[in-house]
Structures are given as C-alpha cells and as structure tokens.
Amino acid sequence: MHIKSAVFVKGVVGEDEILDDGIPQVPFIGRSNVGKSSVINSLTGQKNLARSSPTPGRTREINFFLINNSFYLVDLPGYGFAKASLDERDAITKLIYWYLLFSDIDHKKVVLIIDAHVGVTSYDAEMLRRLEDKDKKLIIVANKIDKIKKSDYVKQMRAIQGVIGDYPVIPYSAEKKIGVSQLATELLK
Ligand code: GDP
C-alpha cells in the first residue's frame, strides 16, 4: 500500500478554528526535533510538505494534509521544545492535549514518533500513558534507526518495545526511507 496523494488543506493556530468536517483524522505527534517533518515528507514522497519550524512562535500551528482523499494527516506541534519559553511550552502542551485528549474529534489512529537512537524519553512516556488512558489506536514510529550501531540494534529495539508494550513499533528512517511502506500500510488499514 502506498500514499497516492497528499494535499495541504489548512493550517490553524489555536483551538478555535480546528478543522472538524467528518473526515477521519490521524495526528502525528512527537518531541520537537524527533524528525516529524522528515517522517511526513518521506511518507508522502514530497520534499517539503511539512516544514520544521525552529522558531517557537510558529510551533503552535496545526497543519492538515488530505491523504488519498480519505483522511487528514494532522501535523501537531512538537512537544518538549527546549528553546521555547515556559509559557510558550505550556500553551503548546495544552493545545496538543486538548486536541488529542479532550476535543470531540474522532482519531482514526494516533502516530507517536520517537527517536530510536535516543529511546523513549519521559516526555514520550507521559504522552503514551495519556493516549493509552483514552484508548487511542496508537502506532509508534521509531525514527532515525540509521543512527543506531548495527551491534546495538536488536537490544535497542527490544528496549523500546518493552517500554511501549503491545502497540506496533515501526522501525523507521526518514533519511534512508526505511519503513515507509510499513507505515503507509498501517495508516491505510
Ligand atoms: P521535527 O522538528 O520533529 O519536525 O524534525 P525535523 O524533521 O526537522 O528533523 C530534525 C533533525 O533530525 C534534522 O536535522 C533532520 O535532518 C534529522 N533527521 C530526521 N529524520 C532523520 C533520520 O531518519 N535519520 C537521521 N540520521 N536524521 C534524521
């Protein structure tokens, strides 16, 4: 299975104008710098569909991309942004939690991207627990596997799966385009 079309539909700031038109939504979330933009671009086969936004001011945007005319890939701001002020970080965290956990939007799946090289951080674990509490259908993308030493790979992936539990973990490299079809298949299921 693969993604045939990906079209930017809308960027919103804040919760007021969130898109909720009945088309299923699949949010992509992850710690900033985890490679979320790179994952979205590699998955959709477009170089610049999602742009990373290094300036904290722009990170509150939620971007909607229509995939195969059937669901929205929702690019949420990255969490745990080191450079953002505390207030900014709080605002981003609140927005993400509101959208994921407390809005009425029906999420077909939720894609949590982690850094395979770094492993599951405390931020990731907190997010995972909250999503689990809400019975979300989770897919975990372990990005940047190209950065893991070959001799550490099996141990590292086992450790990640151990923390994640029963959800599917897709080994991924946006850089080397590994895991793209596996992720597309999970999304289109
Ligand atoms: P975002 O902030 O989560 O959207 O992250 P970006 O997509 O902007 O990526 C952050 C950094 O990680 C950039 O320097 C990317 O080149 C790098 N990166 C992203 N994916 C990969 C990957 O699969 N492998 C490696 N080695 N680097 C990656």
Image: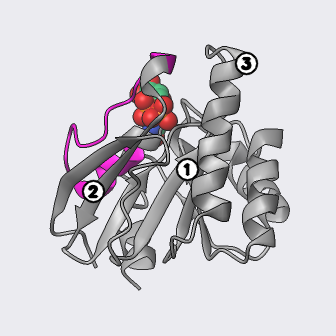
Q: Position of residue 4 (x, y in %)?
A: 16, 69
Q: Amino acid at mark 1?
A: Ile
Q: Nearer the viewer, residue 162 or 4?
A: 4
The image quarter in which residue 74 lies = bottom left
For the residues labelled 2 and 1, say whether their Cβ atoms are less than 8 Å apart: no
Badge 3 marks a residue whose secondary structure is: helix
Q: Nearer the viewer, residue 183 or 28?
A: 28
Q: CA distance from mark 1 to mark 3?
A: 20 Å
Residue 178 place in picture, x, y as percent: 41, 55
Q: Amino acid at mark 2?
A: Phe
Amino acid bearing label 3: Leu
Magenta residues, start to end: 38-56
The verdict on residue 13 being magenta is no
Q: Quadrant of residue 30?
A: top right
Identify the residue position indicated by label 3 in the image. 86
Residue 64, numbered circle: none
**What residue does disc 2 label?**
65
Position of 15 relative to 107 (above/below): above
Q: Position of residue 117 (x, y in %)?
A: 66, 38
Which dot marks residue 29? 1
Categorize mark 3 by other alpha carbons within 10 Å: few (<14), some (14-19), many (20+).
few
Picture residue at 15% right of the left edge, 65% below the top: 5
Residue 35 appears left or right of 9: right
- Residue with the most extreme bottom position: 189
Quadrant, the C terminus: bottom left
